[in-house]
C-alpha cells in the first residue's frame, strides 16, 4: 500500500510540475495584404493578393506547435479594411504581427530582388526586423508611415517577400513550391522568436 501511495504521489507531483512549467501560448497574427478587388501588385497572371493569402494559409496549416497560435486577418479573398485589420490586431493583442506583401518596381528585373522588411518605430519591432533580416538576408530594413505599422499597438513588421517585376522571384512566389518554402521559413522564424 505504501508503494502504491508513493507511485501516486510521484505521478501527481509530475503532473503538477508539468502544468506549472508549461510555456504560455504565443499568439502571432499573419496579415495577408490586399484582397477582394484590391489585387496588389500584378504581372503575368500573378497577383499579390493571391500569393500572400496562400503563404499565410500555409503558415497556419503547417503549424504543429501547440504553444503557438497563428491567427489570420483574412482567410479568403475578402478585403478587410486597414482599420478592421489593425482593430482585430489591437483587440487580440498578439505577441507580434507579420504583414505579408509582394514588392513591385518599375526598375529592370535585375535591379529589383530580395525581401524587404518595413518596421515600426519602436525597439521591439526593430529587434524583430533585425532578426528576420539576418535569418533571410533581407535586402533592406525600412521604416514607413504605413497604416498597419503606425496603428498596430503590438510589435509589427511588414514583409515584402520578393519582387513581382523580377521574373525569377515572381515565378517562385507564384508556385506551390515557392509558397510552401516561404511559409516554412517564416513559420520556423516564428517558432524561434
Image (tube, rainbow, N blue to C red):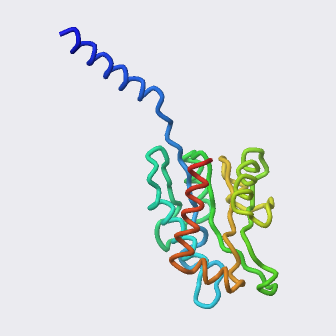
Q: Is 94 above or below relative to 167? A: above
Residue 138 in the image: state x and y as whole percent.
74, 64
Residue 123 in the image: state x and y as whole percent.
77, 44
**Viewer-side residue, 134 vs 85:** 134
Residue, far front: 3
Let me know if residue 92 appears in the view: yes
Q: At 70% across and 60% down in the image, what residue appears?
A: 147
Residue 104 in the image: state x and y as whole percent.
73, 79
Dividing the picture into quarters, in which one does residue 169 lie? bottom right
Point out the image quarter for the N terminus: top left
**Viewer-side residue, 105 vs 135:** 135
Residue 110 in the image: state x and y as whole percent.
79, 84
Residue, far top: 2
Q: At 78% across and 79% down in the image, what residue appears?
A: 112
Let me know if residue 84 appears in the view: no
Left or right: 107, with 65 as reference point:
right
Q: Is 95 above or below relative to 12? A: below
Q: At 80% across and 59% down in the image, what residue appears?
A: 143
Dividing the picture into quarters, in which one does residue 171 lie? bottom right
Amino acid at each position: 500500500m505504501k508503494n502504491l501511495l508513493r507511485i501516486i504521489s510521484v505521478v501527481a507531483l509530475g503532473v503538477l510540475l508539468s502544468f506549472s512549467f508549461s510555456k504560455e501560448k504565443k499568439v502571432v497574427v499573419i496579415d495577408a495584404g490586399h484582397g477582394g478587388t484590391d489585387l496588389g501588385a500584378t504581372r503575368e497572371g500573378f497577383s499579390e493578393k493571391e500569393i500572400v493569402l496562400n503563404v499565410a494559409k500555409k503558415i497556419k496549416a503547417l503549424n504543429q506547435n501547440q504553444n503557438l497560435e497563428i491567427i489570420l486577418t483574412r482567410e479568403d479573398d475578402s478585403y478587410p479594411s486597414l482599420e478592421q485589420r489593425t482593430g482585430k490586431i489591437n483587440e487580440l493583442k498578439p505577441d507580434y504581427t507579420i504583414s505579408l506583401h509582394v514588392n513591385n518596381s518599375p526598375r529592370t528585373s535585375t535591379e529589383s530582388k530580395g525581401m524587404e522588411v518595413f518596421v515600426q518605430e519602436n525597439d521591439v519591432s526593430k529587434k524583430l526586423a533585425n532578426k528576420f533580416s539576418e535569418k533571410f538576408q533581407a535586402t533592406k530594413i525600412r521604416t514607413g508611415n504605413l497604416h498597419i505599422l503606425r496603428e498596430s499597438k503590438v510589435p509589427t513588421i511588414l514583409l515584402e517577400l520578393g519582387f513581382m517585376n523580377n521574373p525569377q522571384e515572381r515565378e517562385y512566389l507564384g508556385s506551390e513550391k515557392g509558397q510552401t518554402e516561404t511559409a516554412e521559413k517564416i513559420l520556423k522564424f516564428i517558432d524561434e522568436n
